[in-house]
Image (cartoon, helix red, strand yellow):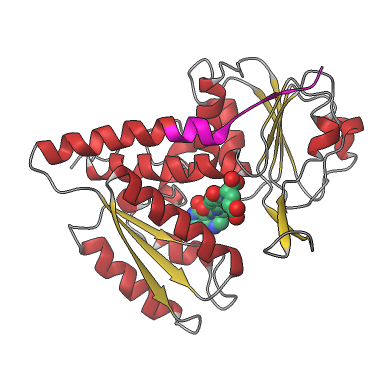
Amino acid sequence: MPAQLIDGLLVAAGIKREVQADVAGLLARGLRPPHLRVLLIGSHPASKAYVTSKVRACAEVGITSDTEILPDTISEKSLKARIAELNADDEVDGILVQLPLPDHLTPMSVIESIDHRKDVDGFHPMNVGRLALNMPGFRSCTPAGIQELFKHYMIPTKAKHAVVVGASNIVGTPMALMLSREHDSYNGKATTTICHKYTKDLTAHTIAADILIVAAGQPNLITAPMVKEGVVVVDVGMNRVADHTSEKGYKLVGDVDFEGVSQKASWITPVPGGVGPMTVAMLMKNTLLSAKKAVYPD
Ligand code: L34
């Protein structure tokens, strides 16, 4: 039986409505709206589009935002000096440095210079460490959004075998931590395997998965023979592949062969319209939480 679709656009719209209502509540109490500051460095082709969708989401929910476009020649020192100013600015609730950065900059060093209380991406070592220790903190938006999808569709993770393909700092690693550690019935307690580029016999792992999260950045990495009947598949891949029939000259595909795998899966996320919109919605939620000082009270 073909899989049921996990609709990220639908769930993201619900989360944004909740954030919007909460923002309205802040304004009704005479408070200023939450403010997100985005730093966009250089000219990575996809980054501009992703930042545009974040800025648009902010406007939708009543969060104010500014995007600072910085030259791709900026030194790490100047970038950190700007971040230090934003850290000290009481009008700024969230600071987001869009990745990837130009090669001469060290992403983790730049991220670490952000005040962890304004790290609405949840990438700062303090926030990732607090996730690992099951303490309150900002959670990385993509894996947190995937948890929300499981919750919405009542897909249990408890005691399931979850396999995460991809071990990045921003998706695979926090996803595996959340699946294995966070203690609420849809949000953890899975037996979790992390696969990465050195994994031998990837299929031996993926075929055993009850829940398969794929964040490897490789089109068609996962095909139907690699999964078992009834698996829940979440495709985090966001690959632009040449397509001369489309106006843009490319089309967006995930890491999963959707056509084939959806014949065996019980649930599957599409690309686009799956995880991407959830990432943006969770950023709105984190920015609101920061403005409310809900994660790190003074
Ligand atoms: N600092 N850098 C920072 N934070 C992030 O959370 C990100 N990421 C990733 C890249 N760099 C980052 C994003 O925002 C990827 N990413 C992201 C966000 C949203 C979407 C995709 C990637 C998204 O909305 N995708 C749409 C399709 C967009 C299109 O058509 O191009 C979707 O439906 O999947």
Where is residue 143 drawn, in percent x and y? 55, 38
The residue at the point 17 percent across, 34 percent down is: 25
Q: Which residues are magenta?
A: 1-13
The residue at the point 62 percent across, 28 percent down is: 6
Where is residue 122 drawn, in percent x and y? 44, 47
Q: Residue furthest bottom?
A: 73
**Residue 245 occupies quadrant:** bottom right
Where is residue 109 drawn, in percent x and y? 47, 65
In the rendered structure, the answer to whether residue 27 lies left or right of residue 148 reads left
Where is residue 218 drawn, in percent x and y? 78, 52
In the rendered structure, the answer to whether residue 271 lies left or right of residue 263 reads left
In the rendered structure, the answer to whether residue 107 lies left or right of residue 297 reads right
Q: Is residue 104 above or below residue 46?
A: below
**Residue 21 occupies quadrant:** top left
50 falls in the magenta region: no
Q: Is residue 170 visible?
A: no
Q: Is residue 209 above or below residue 109?
A: above
The residue at the point 53 percent across, 61 percent down is: 49
